[in-house]
Image: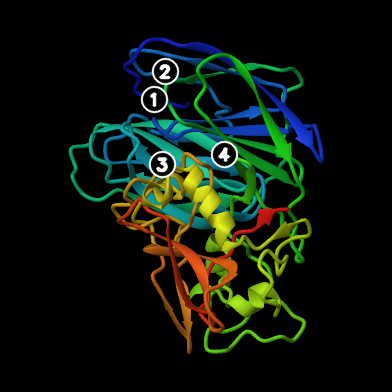
Amino acid sequence: MVLAMLNSKAQDYLIGFAGTGDTNSVTNIKVDNLTSGATVTLNGGDMLHLFGSVGIGTTDIDNGKVQIYPNPMTEKSTLTFTAFEKGNVVISIVDIEGKTVYQTCILVSTGINSFRVSDLSKGIYFVKVTSKNYYYSTKLISQSNLQSKARIEYISSAKIAIGIHLKSAAATIDMPYNDGDQLLFEGISGQYSTIVADVPLSSKTITFNFVTCMDADNNNYSIVQIGTQTWMAENLNVGVRINGSQSQINNGIIEKYCFLDLEAYCDIYGGLYQWNEMMQYVITPGVQGICPPGWHIPTDEEWTIVTDYLGGGQVAGGKMKSTGTNMYGTGLWGSPNTGATNESGFTAFPAGTCYGYGTFGYLGIYGYWWSSTESSANGAWYRFMYMSSSSALRSSHGKPLGNSVRCLCD
């Protein structure tokens, strides 16, 4: 079930979906209501029905794929869900006001996975399970009087043969909505993934422009259009990991740093790159560098275009930062994650930096993204965001530091 507490006048909008660009087929769509915290997943031929309510609205999902029992819970419940593939999932507990009270990232096996949920104070919550290719959201009611910190603990997994069975006929899927709610639509078609941010005020069609974004390691990236620009909606993660005590060198191999020299952090936050390695040892602004074909390293001017479009550097960071707090190692920002709405769909992660000499810092606190524009012979311009600020500010530092990279479509 997907829940939201709604208090304003009722709405009644129908949202359809279409694809364009490299493919016009839409396989499925994930919709996040960033205002209420509700999430729903549709098949490509489905219609989304946005409706208003003065109470708690619900929509059904396949309970054979996710369930919580007992529900309501007193002290603890068991969360069980079906994973369609082996990989990392993020399990979140979100209260009715949209605040994340607990979140963890864990590697699960294909099949049925079980977790114990406990120590939730009294209230209504959403429990969300998110991976790269499937999404669940269900309601949990806690009747406990405990005031301790919520916990999620792994119990077991059972391997089964998995087949993803899409509905043979289109359906209309309900989702609670109030005028002004910020929605993020992610359209998926095979290797393609495109994010569209919108605040619907009437019935309409959301069109996903699918553009190939595949790096040299055959990794595919979600993309998002912000104004006239099309950006990667994830940090670049291409190349062979080397230790932070080494320098990235011009040896014909793309090299990257992973926080604390652990590949798992690259899987979540993307790689960290020295400026020269990112640029592939040229100094031309706007060069492709280590970006996928058809994409390039954004110039300082192109970074200014996107932050100006989002209201200027003092407020753009909040509109670009991923939401949620306090989850070291799960892609989220430290508390208080000031101003974070992610209403642009940019989904900036706080990957920190590599100082060299084996030293890393600021994971969950700062995110730094290179531009392809030099500030001097030894330095370059970059943008940074901070957990306690809504800004996306411009600065420069030395080229040997290892920072995150976002690519911009040509």
| Residue where numbered disc 1 is placed | 4
Q: Identify which residue is drawn at 77% across, 82% down.
A: 252
Q: Nearer the viewer, residue 404 or 138?
A: 404
Q: Is residue 292 left or right of residue 196?
A: right
| Residue where numbered disc 3 is placed | 341
Q: Is residue 15 above or below residue 305?
A: above
Q: Are marks 4 and 1 in contact (CB under 8 Å)?
A: no
Query: What is the distance, in whole Å, between disc 3 and disc 4 at their CAs?
Result: 20 Å
Q: Is residue 47 above or below residue 345?
A: above
At mark 4, the secondary structure is: strand
Q: Earlier in the sequence, mark 4 or mark 1?
A: 1
Q: Earlier in the sequence, mark 2 or mark 3?
A: 2
The 10 Å Cα crowd at callout 3, few under 14, some 14 to 19, many 20 or more, is many
Q: Position of residue 405 (x, y in %)?
A: 58, 64
Report the disc number at residue 407: none
Q: Are marks 2 and 1 in contact (CB under 8 Å)?
A: yes
Q: Position of residue 150 (x, y in %)?
A: 30, 48
| Residue where numbered disc 4 is placed | 135
Q: Position of residue 187 (x, y in %)?
A: 66, 36
| Residue where numbered disc 2 is placed | 57
Q: Earlier in the sequence, mark 3 or mark 4?
A: 4
Q: Nearer the viewer, residue 128 or 84?
A: 128
Q: Amino acid at mark 3?
A: Thr
Q: Identify which residue is drawn at 53% across, 49% down.
A: 306
At mark 3, the secondary structure is: loop
Q: Nearer the viewer, residue 64 or 294?
A: 294
Q: Amino acid at mark 1?
A: Ala
Q: Amino acid at mark 2?
A: Gly
- Labels 3, 4: front one: 3
